[in-house]
Image (cartoon, helix red, strand yellow):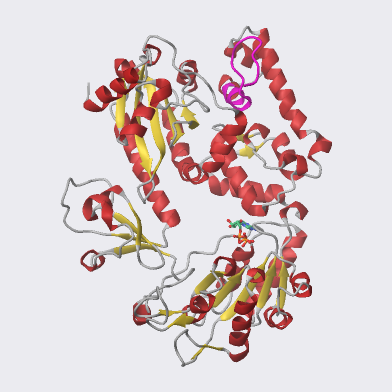
């Protein structure tokens, strides 16, 4: 037995776990699972494509793959339904908790404690009931080194695949890289001489923030540079050999010091994403924005949060004559009142405590002849509004601590979810600024008023899981069109990511769709969506009772696949015993 396994057995004995007894088999409640899925949204979002790729390889191999959060809760499974059936007996299923304190020595729980990849083979499992398994797990770390969860591949001990452990390690590393690309402003591949063991598989990747500080690195980069480089600037020795793989500094805030500005090479913008939708209200706004892109008037985009305001601003930039220049997005609500002037107009070196020695250019200058997108303009303080108005009137900025003005060439596109005329009446927004910004007014409809919700949903599903052809059932479509969508397209995206994650078949059904305020949807009660779930739940319970708890027979009675039934049971927290109650 390896030292890790020995230490784990010792912990189990010290916690008075009895190997011959049943392990703790509590399943967490449906509402808690929903919360856990919400909490782990980024982990799920990044894992989904990898699980989708893995899934076909596991079919008919008696293997399943599982994803657990950092607390050992299983939040996703894919794999061979035949083995899933056996696995269910020991709760290798969604909603079970595989922490060592519950399940004794096991690959998920022990990988979480040891923070190392591990394979637990047959009798190495502490509880006898788990000794028919061999499970291979690898911890998943964020690029900043935070433990996020575990990826596991399990099977009967006699079927263990020789590369199972290698595969989970590769998936965990691929996930770390996906996080790096999703979160860092700039990703660089570094090279150099390795001091420790060389990792053959992955390019050493480093993620940098807008201030050029290292915010994340993958395992190879950690071996090369050491973990203590987090928060520091990249050593020039490595920077010299580094290749930039992703650079969003033109989109957001290019925070390079003044002197470095001229050296920053132009970075091509990503191709513009298609703005999906055929609803007349939406098309009207799109046509207006496309026209506005060709002229230089200021544009004001109005719409609730998540309706696509930033996407529209990007479209205006990228389809207009300034497309080759930077697009700089500024979220006015997230900049503190004290810093707004230095953020927008820049500052001279040493002009205030905490300032960079070399000084910084402001966002107006960073946008050069491109577009500055002032998001959440309605949340700007009156002081900042006054400063902004001056810039728009005089077309110059004066960096903090300087007495020299610099010309502004950028085009301004502003957006807000607030009703600015109301804000003006309440004295919170300056009327003169409103009229300066308002040039062309583009109003985006909230999703609940759009007639193309299903078209958008189908479009999103294709983007989320391009390699699967997932469709929506009739009931799922009714559910989506009857909901009020307070979070608009962004909420729809989140719901569909979860749904695609929860189904491992080619259909998204109501059980996979988790809506926050279902009761608030205008028509949901009218068409009885909750009772649909309730009816399905009752039908499953009845079928299980009629079949004496035999899942295969119950599935036949219900005319659905056994695997589908298992997933529905997990969703409704139904155990396969007679007269079971919801947990
Ligand atoms: N018509 C559309 N087609 C495809 N995706 C869309 C569409 N509209 C919005 N989205 C997507 O919805 C999400 C939210 O869009 P965006 O960030 O532009 O909204 P917003 O109105 O600026 O939100 P906020 O006010 O919260 O900043 C993004 O992921 C965007 O890609």
Q: Which residue does the image show at 74% across and 66% down from the upper left? A: 284
Q: Is residue 410 left or right of residue 151?
A: right
What main secondary structure does the magenta stretch of the protein show?
A: loop
Q: Nearer the viewer, residue 243 or 351?
A: 351
In the rendered image, the vertical position of residue 568 relative to residue 346, given as above or below: above
Residue 125 visible? The answer is no
Residue 450 appears in which quarter of the rendering?
bottom right
Q: Position of residue 447 (x, y in %)?
A: 72, 54
Taking the magenta stretch, the answer to whether it contains residue 247 is: no
Q: Quadrant of residue 500?
A: top right
Q: Identify the image quadrant of the C terminus.
A: top right
Q: Tell me how many marks there are.
A: 0
Instruction: Report the side of 126 relative to 511 (left or right).
Output: left
Answer left or right for 168 relative to 511: left
Q: In this picture, is 547 found above or below 33?
A: above
**Residue 576 is inside the magenta segment:** yes
Residue 28 in picture, x, y percent from top left:
55, 27
- Residue at (68, 81) in percent of width and height: 433
Q: Residue 310 appears at what percent x and percent y?
A: 60, 65
* Residue 107 image offset from top left, x and y in percent: 35, 27
Above or below, comparing residue 98 to residue 414 in the picture: above
* Residue beneath the point at 66% across and 59% down: 305
Q: What range is drawn magenta here?
A: 566-583
Query: In the displayed image of the protein, which residue is found farthest to the bottom?
Result: 404
Query: In terms of depth relative to the viewer, which is nearer, 462 or 528?
Result: 528
Q: Which residue is the extreme one toward the right?
A: 526
Residue 357 visible in rendering: yes
Quarter of the image with the N terminus is top left
């Amino acid at each position: 037995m390896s030292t890790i396994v020995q230490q784990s057995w010792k912990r189990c004995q010290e916690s008075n776990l009895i190997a011959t007894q049943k392990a703790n088999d509590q399943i967490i409640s449906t509402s808690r699972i929903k919360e856990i899925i919400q909490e782990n949204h980024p982990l799920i979002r990044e894992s989904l494509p990898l699980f989708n790729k893995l899934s076909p390889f596991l079919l008919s191999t008696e293997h399943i793959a599982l994803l657990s959060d950092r607390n050992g809760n299983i939040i996703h499974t894919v794999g061979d339904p035949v083995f899933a059936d056996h696995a269910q007996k020991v709760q290798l299923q969604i909603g079970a908790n595989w922490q060592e304190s519950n399940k004794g020595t096991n690959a998920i729980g022990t990988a979480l404690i040891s923070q190392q990849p591990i394979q637990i083979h047959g009798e190495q499992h502490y509880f006898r009931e788990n000794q028919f398994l061999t499970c291979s797990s690898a911890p998943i770390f964020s690029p900043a080194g935070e433990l996020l969860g575990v990826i596991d591949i399990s099977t009967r001990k006699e079927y263990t695949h020789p590369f199972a452990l290698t595969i989970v390690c590769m998936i965990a590393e691929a996930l770390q890289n996906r996080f790096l690309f999703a979160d860092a402003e700039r990703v660089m591949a570094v090279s150099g001489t390795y001091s420790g063991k060389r990792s053959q598989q992955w390019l050493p990747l480093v993620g940098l923030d807008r201030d050029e500080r290292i915010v994340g690195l993958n395992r190879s980069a950690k071996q090369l540079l050491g973990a203590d480089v987090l928060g520091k600037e990249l050593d020039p020795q490595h920077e010299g050999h580094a290749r930039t793989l992703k650079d969003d500094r033109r989109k957001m805030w290019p925070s390079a010091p003044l002197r470095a500005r001229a050296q920053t090479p132009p970075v091509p913008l990503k191709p513009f994403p298609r703005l999906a939708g055929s609803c007349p209200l939406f098309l009207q706004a799109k046509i207006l924005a496309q026209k506005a892109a060709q002229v230089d008037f200021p544009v004001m985009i109005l719409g609730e949060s998540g309706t696509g305001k930033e996407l529209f601003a990007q479209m205006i930039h990228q389809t207009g004559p300034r497309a080759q220049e930077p697009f700089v997005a500024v979220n006015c609500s997230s900049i503190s009142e004290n810093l707004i002037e230095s953020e927008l107009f820049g500052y001279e070196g040493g002009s205030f405590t905490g300032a960079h020695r070399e000084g910084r250019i402001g966002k107006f200058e960073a946008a050069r002849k491109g577009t500055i997108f002032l998001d959440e303009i309605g949340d700007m303080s009156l002081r900042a509004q006054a400063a902004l108005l001056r810039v728009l009137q005089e077309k110059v900025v004066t960096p903090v601590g300087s007495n020299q003005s610099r010309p502004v060439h950028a085009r301004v596109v502003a957006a807000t979810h607030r009703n600015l005329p109301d804000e003006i009446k309440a004295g919170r927004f300056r009327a003169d600024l409103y009229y300066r910004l308002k040039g062309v007014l583009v109003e985006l409809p909230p999703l609940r008023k759009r007639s193309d919700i299903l078209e958008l949903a189908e479009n999103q599903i294709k983007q989320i899981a391009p390699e699967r052809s997932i469709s929506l059932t009739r009931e799922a479509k009714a559910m989506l069109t009857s909901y009020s969508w307070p979070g608009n397209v962004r909420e729809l995206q989140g719901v569909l990511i979860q749904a695609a994650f929860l189904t491992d078949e080619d259909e998204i059904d109501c059980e996979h769709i988790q809506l926050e305020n279902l009761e608030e949807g205008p028509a949901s009660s009218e068409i009885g969506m909750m009772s649909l779930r309730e009816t399905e739940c009752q039908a499953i319970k009845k079928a299980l009772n009629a079949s004496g708890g035999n899942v295969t027979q119950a599935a036949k009675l219900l005319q659905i696949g056994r695997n589908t039934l298992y997933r529905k049971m997990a969703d409704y927290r139904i155990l396969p015993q007679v007269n079971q109650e919801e947990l």
